[in-house]
């Protein structure tokens, strides 16, 4: 039985800050769910995703992962949730590709004893987050030797080492399923609720939430501030590689599991140790109103990468790390922005570290 005081403790550690309540509950209308169930569901998913499904068999409630194509490029980003039922998983994805992902799964199903069911009309996905949790990095420190991550690849260790079991198991309150976001603690909490639930009423019983969230502080704005991409607008299918989307930094890829679709190139990149482009936040001092041609960010005749999206005074770009950080400000269309390494990026590199100097040689 789940005790309310435990849920409040979960809220306090992940969503609350001192001062007036600033938590925002937002219905993520662009996200939806599939259910994969059956006696072979675990082994089936293991061969299709970048992460290790066995994390969910050892007490972890949710995990981040990606589905790749045969060339190793990202097709769908996803959060997979463990449920109370044996051999049953919920897969959260962009609603626009829900049907496509369902077909993708069924294509590889062959004769396995599994069912792939859409829950689009049964459940909604919500984010509970605190916009005050956005912590900006000091750009002046981006050049320090302890933060030279231009070639760094961080293996996904056991999720229990990154997310304590007590904070990442599924919490149940009435008919709500509540999970900590498995990507980074800064992202707050994910909630899965039946479409018939009065979620505002139920959540207000246990969380302090804002009655009038500001238009500026949307979940997309929040994610962009943190430099986290989500969905096909930020991660166009077949367009980038998982490590460029920070899948390793977000605990979404395992380099120790067996083979899966698209694994070869990801493993090769891991062993060579070079990732020159990653998704990074853009903070606008002059808000962009007209995006550059083909979304290409050119500054002083240097191609810095692609703009993925803009929300108010922040944006998200797939940037060449070393080059983008060389400039104090960069021109993005008719706007001016600065970029930085997000505060949640790892500060110390393991043996796979490749310094900026070595990468640029």
Image (cartoon, rainbow, N blue to C red):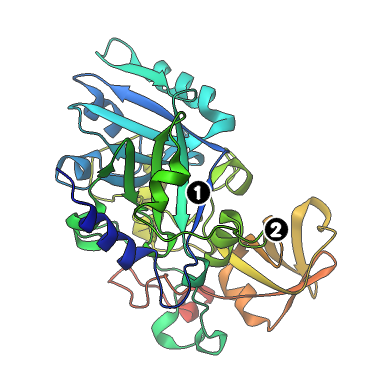
Percent across and percent down for residue 222 are 56, 61
In the shown orientation, is residue 83 left or right of residue 125?
left
Q: Which residue is painted at 55% across and 90% down in the image?
A: 140
Percent across and percent down for residue 188 are 40, 59
**Nearer to us in this view, 277 or 80:** 80
Percent across and percent down for residue 56 are 22, 42
Q: Quadrant of the N terminus?
A: top left
Q: Which residue is painted at 46% across and 39% down in the image?
A: 125
Of marks 2 and 1, the one in the foreground: 2
Answer yes or no: do the residues labelled 2 and 1 have beta carbons within 8 Å? no
Q: Residue furthest top?
A: 111
Percent across and percent down for residue 210 are 52, 60
Answer above or below: position of 59 versus 104.
below
In the shown orientation, is residue 154 left or right of residue 329?
left
Answer above or below: position of 51 versus 17.
above
Q: Secondary structure at mark 2?
A: strand
In the shown orientation, is residue 260 left or right of residue 18?
left
Residue located beneath label 2 in the image: 310
- Is residue 313 in sight in this rendering? yes
**Nearer to us in this view, 128 or 136:** 128
**Cα separation between marks 2 and 1:** 21 Å
In the shown orientation, is residue 247 left or right of residue 63?
right
Q: In the rendered structure, find residue 216 and report the number of the disc placed on it.
A: none
Q: Badge 1: few (under 14), some or many (20 or more) residues near its Cα, within 10 Å?
A: many
Q: Badge 2: few (under 14), some or many (20 or more) residues near its Cα, within 10 Å?
A: many
First of labels 2, 1 by sequence position? 1
**Nearer to us in this view, 176 or 158:** 176
Q: Which residue is painted at 32% across and 35% down in the image?
A: 175
Q: Secondary structure at mark 1?
A: loop
Q: In the rendered structure, find residue 241 and report the number of the disc placed on it.
A: 1
């Amino acid at each position: 039985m789940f005790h309310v005081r435990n849920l409040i403790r979960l809220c306090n550690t992940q969503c609350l800050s001192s001062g007036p309540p600033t938590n925002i509950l937002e219905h993520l209308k662009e996200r939806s769910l599939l259910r994969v169930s059956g006696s072979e569901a675990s082994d089936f998913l293991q061969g299709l995703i970048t992460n290790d499904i066995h994390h969910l068999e050892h007490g972890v409630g949710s995990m981040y992962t990606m589905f790749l194509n045969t060339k190793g490029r990202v097709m769908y980003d996803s959060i997979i949730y463990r449920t109370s039922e044996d051999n049953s998983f919920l897969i959260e994805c962009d609603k626009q590709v829900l049907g496509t992902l369902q077909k993708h799964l069924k294509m590889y199903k062959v004769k396995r004893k599994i069912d792939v069911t859409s829950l689009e009309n049964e459940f909604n996905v919500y984010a509970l987050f605190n916009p005050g949790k956005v912590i900006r990095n000091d750009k002046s420190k981006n050049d320090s030797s302890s933060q030279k991550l231009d070639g760094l690849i961080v293996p996904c260790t056991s999720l229990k080492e990154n997310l304590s079991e007590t904070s990442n198991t599924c919490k149940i309150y009435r008919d709500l399923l509540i999970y900590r976001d498995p990507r980074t603690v800064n992202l707050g909490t994910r909630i899965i609720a039946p479409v018939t639930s009065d979620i505002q009423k139920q959540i207000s019983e246990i969380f302090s939430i804002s009655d009038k969230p500001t238009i500026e502080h949307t979940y997309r704005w929040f994610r962009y501030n943190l430099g986290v991409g989500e969905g096909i607008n930020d991660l166009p299918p077949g367009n980038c590689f998982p490590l460029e989307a920070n899948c390793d930094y977000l605990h979404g890829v395992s380099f120790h599991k067996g083979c899966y679709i698209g694994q070869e190139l990801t493993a090769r990149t891991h062993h060579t140790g070079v990732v020159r482009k990653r998704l990074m936040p853009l903070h606008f001092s002059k808000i962009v109103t007209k995006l550059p041609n083909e979304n290409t960010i050119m500054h002083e005749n240097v191609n810095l990468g692609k703009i993925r999206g803009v929300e108010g005074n922040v944006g998200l770009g797939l940037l060449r790390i070393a080059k983008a950080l060389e400039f104090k400000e960069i021109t993005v269309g008719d706007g001016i922005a600065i970029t930085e390494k997000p505060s949640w990026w790892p500060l110390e590199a393991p043996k796979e570290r490749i310094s900026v100097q070595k990468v640029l040689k």
